Amino acid sequence: MCSSDLFHMVPAGSAGVLEALGEVRPASLEEEGFVHLSQAEQLEGTLDVHFEGVDRVLLLELDPEQVAADVRFEPSRGGALFPHLFRPINLAKDVIDRTTLSRGPGGRFQLPEAITARG
């Protein structure tokens, strides 16, 4: 079973490289065997933990039906279940929305209301 909201984030400066490659293949895929994903309610924590010092982030929303066969929910930060994708993200087939997030007042990333309402 796959959640209706699955997201992956990358520093916005790498967006052009990803477009040229046509896929997202982060170091975690080689090192751990999967791509780290988050659900809507996990995004703020993921941004706080993994994107310190980054001013802009590209948020990719994945099509849950397209990736369902390759996603597993496994314990991660604090024992919470996080989605892990066991293959690269195909930008043309897997991504249904892209949003650039910037830091707002207080230095926190500003998530779109449509996403925060889900979590």
Image (cartoon, rainbow, N blue to C red):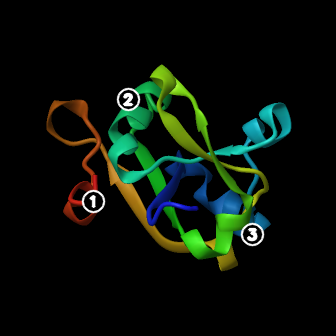
Residue 81 left/right relative to 67: left
Residue wearing tag 2: 48
Q: Is the residue 75 above or below the residue 15 in the image? A: above
Q: Residue at image x 25%, y 35%?
A: 108
Q: Residue at image x 27%, y 59%?
A: 118
At numbered mark 2, what does the secondary structure look like: helix, strand or loop? helix
Percent across and percent down for residue 82 are: 53, 40
Q: Residue at image x 46%, y 56%?
A: 59
Q: Give the mark, 1 or 2, whose residue is nearer the N terminus.
A: 2
Amino acid at circle 1: Arg
In the rendered image, the quadrant that contains the N terminus is bottom right
Whole-angstrom CA distance, mark 2 to mark 3, is 27 Å
Q: Is the residue 95 above or below the residue 115 in the image? A: below
Percent across and percent down for residue 106 are: 16, 30
- Nearer the observer: mark 2 or 3; the answer is 2
Residue 46 left/right relative to 83: left
Amino acid at circle 2: Asp
Percent across and percent down for residue 28 are: 74, 36
Query: Residues at badges 2 and 3 in contact (C-beta under 8 Å)?
Result: no
Residue wearing tag 1: 118
- Nearer the observer: mark 1 or 2; the answer is 1
Amino acid at circle 3: Gly
Q: Residues within 10 Å of mark 1 (few under 14, many from 20)?
A: few
Whole-angstrom CA distance, mark 1 to mark 2, is 19 Å
Q: Is the residue 63 above or below the residue 118 in the image? A: below
Q: Residues within 10 Å of mark 2 (few under 14, many from 20)?
A: few
Does the rendering let one see residue 109?
yes
Query: Residues at badges 1 and 2 in contact (C-beta under 8 Å)?
Result: no
- Nearer the observer: mark 3 or 1; the answer is 1
Q: Residue at image x 56%, y 48%?
A: 37
